[in-house]
Image (cartoon, rainbow, N blue to C red):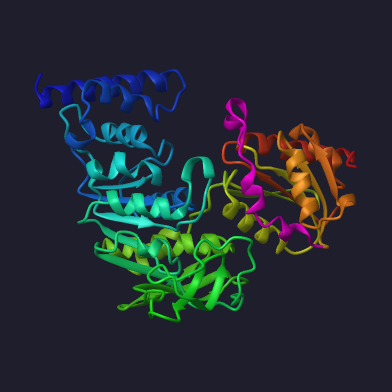
């Protein structure tokens, strides 16, 4: 059977599988691609693709950045093929590509934005062949999955196509060094009032010059290894910005973004430094494909951070924040803890970051807890912390090691029972830190806290 005929059968089979799965209430994010690959193993290489493909990868923020891309482009009137609701591995990407073609194999889209799992680089990039690869950042992630950021940087360097343009974070000395032979554009945030010189985190993934192993000297540091640095010995330094953010005004929720052609004021859709970087990432990439600043700004007007990542609710005078804190990822949790600790007023916390899927199938590696800055939670304005879920006792031990007074800590292995351990005081904030797959459970915990507040049955 010829390749074209196998591809045609693969397209028909995948579309049939997708339609059947949708009728049964499934999202069909992975299986249609898997079926197509069985019929035509080189399907991803052969299938017609959009004229312009932006691939988004990196340790943290790729889902948020990809969603922002799609929301801004859709608001601005652009039609985009994307995996916003699907898998970011090879099966998921292939499923979306198949959905984006006609029965005769012609692409129905001119533009695509795909979130790509960085570990799947070798299975995707040589066949997808994106014109642009956006790298948000590179940090240590789950030891079981990602080993070390240098390993991930090596994978990306090896498999990103040599003709793809890299759009990456200049403030990240690991991400900025990926695929050094490729054409590239850098983005970064100019010095902020909150920047420091010395690392306040337990982990900094780059401690010496990556070129000569000499001493790195930071002009300023934002968090972990993110900042502006220079090697004292060989002159290696943070790259100059092609796209920059400055005048970040968190109280008034604005910032200025610019490049060599000019500047524009943008709304801040979040006061988290993580999300300020995410906004700038989208601006830089959209400028690269030719969108004017004003069109990008207008596209941001009605855009919000996905509620599964961050959501604010209330019950009477009690504010409730749900913060997605990626399980087994020390960096993501450190940023979440730092952000929560900086919220105004007194706070109570529920820590339930365990991954529901993982805990059913293997014994979770908990070394990440000791790379994570639980010390940020040792603040007088954090009045009570409930360690919840299957790792509740591990969280409790780590909190004690961080110096959190024992009388402020409660343990509840049943997440839904955790709100009963709280005071739920008027004027305070309840923060629920949940794992990547427990958004639904976090909503149930929130609703239980609201019920207890209404009935006046808190601790």
Outermost residue toward the left in this view: 2
Q: What is the total number of numbered labels drawn onto the structure image?
A: 0
Viewed as shown, does residue 306 lie left or right of 19?
A: right
- Residue 447 x %, y %: 73, 37
Viewed as shown, does residue 19 lie left or right of 448?
A: left
Read off the magenta span: 355-379
**In magenta segment, residue 211:** no
Quadrant including the C terminus: top right
Q: Which corner quadrant of the image does residue 23 belong to? A: top left
**In magenta segment, residue 368:** yes
- Residue 358 x %, y %: 58, 32
Q: Which corner quadrant of the image does residue 355 belong to? A: top right
Q: Is residue 117 visible?
A: no
Picture layout, residue 209 above or below residue 130: below
Picture layout, residue 179 above or below residue 190: above
| Towards the viewer: 76 or 278 | 278
- Residue 95 x %, y %: 32, 31
Viewed as shown, does residue 124 lie left or right of 408?
A: left
Picture layout, residue 350 above or below residue 334: above
Quadrant including the N terminus: top left
Residue at screen point 50% across, 66% down: 267
Residue at screen point 46% across, 62% down: 279
| Towards the viewer: 384 or 450 | 384
């Amino acid at each position: 059977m010829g390749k074209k005929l196998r591809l045609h059968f693969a397209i028909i089979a995948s579309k049939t599988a997708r339609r059947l799965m949708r009728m049964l209430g499934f999202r069909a994010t992975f299986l249609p691609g898997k079926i197509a690959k069985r019929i035509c193993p080189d399907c991803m290489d052969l299938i017609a693709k959009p004229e312009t493909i932006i691939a988004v990868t990196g340790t943290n923020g790729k889902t948020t950045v990809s969603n922002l891309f799609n929301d801004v482009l859709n608001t601005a009137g652009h039609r985009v093929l994307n995996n916003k609701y699907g898998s970011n591995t090879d099966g998921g990407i292939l499923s979306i590509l198949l959905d984006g073609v006609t029965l005769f194999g012609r692409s129905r889209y001119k533009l695509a934005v795909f979130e790509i799992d960085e570990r799947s680089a070798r299975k995707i990039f040589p066949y997808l062949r994106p014109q642009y690869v956006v790298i948000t950042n590179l940090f240590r992630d789950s030891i079981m999955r990602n080993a070390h950021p240098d390993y991930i940087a090596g994978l990306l360097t090896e498999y990103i196509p040599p003709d793809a343009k890299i759009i990456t974070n200049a403030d990240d000395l690991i991400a900025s060094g990926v695929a050094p032979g490729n054409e590239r554009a850098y983005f970064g945030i100019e010095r902020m009032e909150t920047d420091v010189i010395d690392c306040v985190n337990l982990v900094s993934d780059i401690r010496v010059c990556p070129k000569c192993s000499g001493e790195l000297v930071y002009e300023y540091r934002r968090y972990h290894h993110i900042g502006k640095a220079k090697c004292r010995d060989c002159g290696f330094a943070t790259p100059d910005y092609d796209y920059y953010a400055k005048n970040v005004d968190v109280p008034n929720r604005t910032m200025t973004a610019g490049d060599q052609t000019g500047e524009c004021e943008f709304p801040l859709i979040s006061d988290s430094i993580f999300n300020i970087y995410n906004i700038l990432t989208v601006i830089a990439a959209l400028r690269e494909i030719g969108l004017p600043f004003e069109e990008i700004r207008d596209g941001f007007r009605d855009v919000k951070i996905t509620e599964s990542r961050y959501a604010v609710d209330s019950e009477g005078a009690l504010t409730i924040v749900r913060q997605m804190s990626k399980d087994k990822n020390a960096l993501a949790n450190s940023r979440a803890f730092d952000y929560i600790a900086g919220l105004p007023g007194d706070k109570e916390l529920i820590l339930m970051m365990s991954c529901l899927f993982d805990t059913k199938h293997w014994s979770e590696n908990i070394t990440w807890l000791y790379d994570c800055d639980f010390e940020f939670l040792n603040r007088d304005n954090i009045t009570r912390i409930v360690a919840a879920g299957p790792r509740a006792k591990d969280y409790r031990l780590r909190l004690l090691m961080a110096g959190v007074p024992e009388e402020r800590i409660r343990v509840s292995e049943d997440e839904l029972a955790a709100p009963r351990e709280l005071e739920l005081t008027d004027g305070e904030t309840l923060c629920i830190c949940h794992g990547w797959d427990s958004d639904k459970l976090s909503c149930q915990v929130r609703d239980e806290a609201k019920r207890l507040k209404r009935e006046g049955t808190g601790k």
